[in-house]
Every structure is written in C-alpha cells, then in structure tokens.
Amino acid sequence: MDVKERMSQLADRLLEAQRAYYVDGRPVMSDLEYDGLFDELVRLEQENPQYRSPSSPTLRVGSDLTADFPEVAHTIPVLSLDKAYSADEVVSWMEKTMRNTSSELSFVEEEKIDGISIVLYYEDGLFVRALTRGNGYVGNDVSDNIKTIRAVPLRLTKDVSIAVRGEVYLPKRDFEILKASDPEVANPRNMAAGAVRRQKSIEAAAIPLTVFVYEGFWTDESQTPRDHLSILRALRDLGFRINPHLAVFSSSRERSQELLSSAGLEAAALSFSDLGAYLEEAARRRKDLEYEIDGMVTKVNELGVRQSLGYTEHHPRWAIAYKFESPQAVTKVLGVTVQVGRTGRITPVAELEAVALGGSTVRRATLHNQEYIDELELAVGDTVSVVKRGDVIPAVEEVLEKNAEGNTTYRIPPVCPSCGSTLVQRGAHLFCPDRDCPDQVKGRLSFFTARDQMDMDSIGPKAIEKLYDMGLVRDIPDLYTCDYDRLLGQKGYGEKMIQSFRKAVEDSRTRPFTTVLASLGLPEVGQKGAEILVKGGFDSMDKLLAASDASDIGAFTKIPQIGQQTAVAIISALQDPDMRRRIGQLRACGLQFTQQEQENSLEQIFAGQVWAVTGSFEHFNPRSLALKELEKRGARTVSSITGKTTHLLLGTGGGSKRKTAEELGVRIVDEKEFMELLGRGGKEGRAASGGQLSFDF
C-alpha cells in the first residue's frame, strides 16, 4: 500500500470513528487505538503535505495562525424568528397559518438551543466554509474554528452540495468545569460565542463545543426532501447531529405518527390539543437537559406551504419561537461602566434606571463584551429589556427603542479605566495587560479571601479596598504579614473587627492543599480542577512545580480530565516569576502545600457504579452532600443520564430525569433506600448546624 492510499485509509477510519463517537454516541474503537492512528496520520501528512485531504481529521486540532474573519455573503436567507411568550400565542399563530393555506398542515416542535447560530456550507460532500449569522445576508467566515468541532462532519456520507443551519453550543457540564477556573464567564452561550471567534483556532479547539443542526438547503432543489421531518432524517443520514427531542402536532396523534414513520424518525406524536401541556413540560424539563435552551420553535412541516408563506424582512412566516417566561423588565440605559477583573478581563456593565425585576431592584446589568454590545447595537439612552439569566444574573436582552439623542453603538474605550494601560484583545474579550493594575490586584485579593476559596469572609471586598488604599496590602502574601492595628481609628474599624481579621488569617493556614491551590487563581484550576490534580498524583506544590519546570505536558495530560491546552496554561502560570514568588512567600507564611492523607475507611460499596442525582432531599441539602457520600464510597457521579448510568438517586421534584432513567432501565433509588444503603437508615440525629446530618467518619 503506497503512502497516499494509507493516508486516505487512515482519514476514512478516523472520520468514521469521530462520527460514531460524537454524532452517534457509539464508539467503535478505544482511545488508545484512535490516538495511534491519529498520530500516524499526522506524521504522514507532515512528510507528504501534497496528499493531505481537505477533510482530514487532523484539522480538528486547530492552528496558531490568526484569522481576521472576512465577511462572506450567505446563499440562503438567515433570518431571526418571530416570537411568542405564551402557549396561547403559539396556538393563535398556528390557527392563523392554517387559515392562510388550503392544505392540511402539521407542525414540528424543536428545542431552541441557547447557542451561536452557524451556517455550514458543503460542496460535493466536502466542508468548504462556516459563516456566522451576521446580519442575515453577510456573515463572518469562522471556518477554521468550526473545523475543530468534532460533531461537524468535514465530509458527508453523500456527495451533495448543501447549506445547513445549526446551533453551536457548550454543554452545561463542560461549562461548569471551565467556569471553575474563570468565574467571570457569564454563561455557556457567552463562552461558546467567544470560542467561535477566537483568533487562533488552536484556542477554539480547547473548548469542547458541539452542534445540533435543524435546517438543510440543497443546491439542487430536486434533491430536497418533501417535508421538514424528512430533512431532519436526511441530515442525520449525511452525518450531522440532530436534536432527538422533537414533537409533531397535527389533527390527530395517529396522523402525527404516520408522518414520523414515513420520515423514519422517532419522536412525540401529538395532536393540536396537546400543545399547551407539551410546552409546559418542555419548560419544566429544561433544567435537566445537558445544554441550555431558552424556548421552543414551532415550524410548518410541509415545505410547499413554507414556500407559499414566504418571509418578511425579519423572519420566516412559517416558524415562530416560544420564549420561556423569565423575569423581565423594561428600562433605560443611563450609561456604561467598564469593570476590570482579577485576570485583567474588561467587562462592560449597563447602568440602568432602577427597575423592579424578579423580586429585587436592578440598577446594573452585564453586557459581557464588545461583541455582545455590537450584536445588540446598544447605545446610551436606549430603552432595553432586562432579564435575569438563569433567573439570577441581570443581563440586557434586547434593545426595544433607540435613543432620541442620536447616540451610536457604545464602544469600550481603548485604555484601562483603573491604570490607563492600553487594552489588548484576546479572543472575544479585551484585557488590561498590567498585572499591577489596582483593580486586578484588588480582584486577586478578594478572590483569595472569598468564602468559596480561603474563606477569610470577614476580609471582604470593602476591607480589601481599604487595606489597598492605605498601602497595607499589595499582594496575597501581605494578608499574612499586614499590621492590621493600623486600621484602628479608621471609620468602621474597631478592635472587634481587627480581631476578626486576625482570626480569619490564622484559620486560613489550616485550609487543605486543594483549597490553597484553587485560591491561587491558576488558569483552569478551580476547586474541582484542584481535586482532579491531586487525585491525579499532584498531591503537593513541589510536584506541580517540578513538572512545570520540566515543561512536562504529559505529566498533566495523562490525567483523563486534563487536555493539552489546560496543561500548557497551568505550566505557563506556574513558571511565571510573580506566581513563583507568591507561592514561596505563602509557603513561608505556613499555608498547606502538601495534601494530607485523609483516611477513608468506608467500604467502597458503590465502586464501579455511575450515579446521577436529581430533586431535593430532606437529609442532603444541598444535594452536593449526597454526591460526596457517593464519591467517598467509590461511585462516579454524573450530571446527566446516559446509557452508562447505573443508578439515579431521586428526590422530590425529580422531573424528566426519572422518565429518562425508566426508559434506559436505570435503577432508581429514593432517599430512604439510599440512607439504608449507607448503613444508617436515617436514624442519626441532626447535626447542630443547619439541620443537616454529618456523614464524615
């Protein structure tokens, strides 16, 4: 077999393996076998670049070349959707649509993924480009970044020319892992948007994005399937991921099932009268999904009717988005403040006319970054809608009315508001490059002392501000050498307060190594990341520093949860002279830099089992307490239910996870049985604090 033939064979096998793993969810080879074939292909491509295929799986890793995202015209209409905010509005729209056509209609209901809209273009079955939605007519070419998403096929199963609309998103679990090392990231959508627009595709490849597709437009219209359900089936057969959570509505459940059977799909077959209940159930189950959704989309199934209904300048007349009810208010943007985080990231914040929202008065709302502001076309003086993302974080959702003063879209100033340094662009965000920037220093100090970190709770942000302004603290180690008596006489700082500061400092010296490590602010190393490192063999700072000094990436990547990009980030941070000096000073202050072995004499009764937990509990509040009990006894815990899940611990209000568990044959365990499995049967007394049981031995 010659080299060219071998390279083609390797590419075919790897692409088949990628599709089986990332699209079908059915691995066909081990990770070790895959890595061996991949490395062989990389070597052959380096030696024979003339034979490299444009659909080579090696394109998934990205490159260090920068991109300027040229603008390219769409060949299909890429519009927004009309919106409804109640089931009644959706029903009215369906009735109106049926009145406007003489045909018997059916409708397809799909989840509205809270991600980034993308259009994938293929010619003769090969991926040629990926464009953002842009203004609906022209989008940015982000092909190199999209190629790194393994769920995006680089070569289709048929040689067709097609444009495919989809939504790129970041799964919740992956977001939580990444957020642990970067708490300033607002939500999965914002992180996904930043990844799609990274200037270097190797950076985009480090973010585990994936995609669902939902519309296909064949260049040869004679190849277009007869209805939307058949389009979804065709897209799946071409190698794309489609969302399995579908429903079909028609005049009867029987007719809906006939439509599904004809298309070769499995989904909920319902009648028009079932719509309201279905939308309510969709809203209830959203919290249990592996990804974020912000509504549902109703589409006419029949393509001929779609064509006759046509489009407005803004949206197609054959589809409507039902937005889940969320705390929302209307107010005016009075100004924009620019904040500087502990890592130097610049975050614009809208200053608002005070408005009641979700039981509180809101005066500020995040704007995330310049890209988000540009998307909104937001200017000072605009009237906007404000929502609580996840019912917690206030965010500007939409510009409802432009200002009368003629203010144009807001631009973040090019210099840091704290130190005056010229800002630099990294991915989707701007950063202040000066590590001694006052706001960055205060941010690092506040992060270190926070309750979720070293728990020096009495030394809060206001105290940090005071200590910094008086010149008493300039870096984290100063917290342990500071003369707090110098605060005496300052307004609000009496002897009692000073004593609480000293106690907080002394108590922090006993925090375990995992807590100290997570509090240093290393990239990619939050509390979970610190635990992963320790369990992976890095149970002391000396071991981490030694691996970093040797630039031993493999020492980190041998830990399953740590990829190359994370390893490089950790090594770079630990090689930084400022970080090394800080670690040395904290060691001298008596902090724990070796993980003390904690005897675990508990019988590993759950070893080899995979548990998910849902609902609320009497004895485990928060339910993370139940997760800890499972993990201490050998279980692996997961956030969602798959075919590999063996048990579901079910509390009250478990929602759709129970249904999924029943469908997959997962054993369901209630709280009473769980207590019995733990060998205590619920007979222990309450702990003194918070009415919770203590399960530590």
Image (cartoon, grey):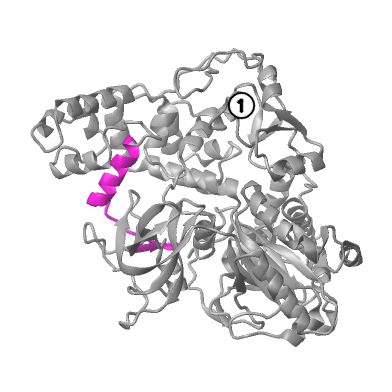
Label 1 CA crowd tier, 10 Å (few <14, some 14–19, many 20+): some
Quadrant in which residue 231 is drawn = bottom right
Q: Give the image location of residue 616, x and y in percent.
A: 60, 34
- Magenta stretch? 424-449
- Residue 267 placement: quadrant: bottom right
Q: In the picture shown, does residue 391 fall above or below 396? A: above
Left/right placement of residue 363 relative to residue 128 reads left
Of the 4 image quadrants, the one containing the N terminus is bottom right
Q: Amino acid at mark 1?
A: Glu
Q: What residue would you read off at disc 1?
A: 631
Instruction: Name which residue lies at 66% across and 83% down.
Output: 75
**Residue 46: image location, x then y, percent:** 63, 60
Residue 486 is situated, as x and y percent measured from the top left of the image, at: 10, 32
Query: 5 or 441, which lies in front?
Result: 441
| Residue 273 falls inside the magenta stretch | no
Is residue 122 or residue 304 the one in the foreground?
304
Q: x and y percent of residue 354 in the render?
A: 33, 61
User: Taking 215 as reference, is 409 left or right?
Assistant: left
Q: Quadrant of residue 44?
A: bottom right
Image quadrant in which the C terminus is located: top right
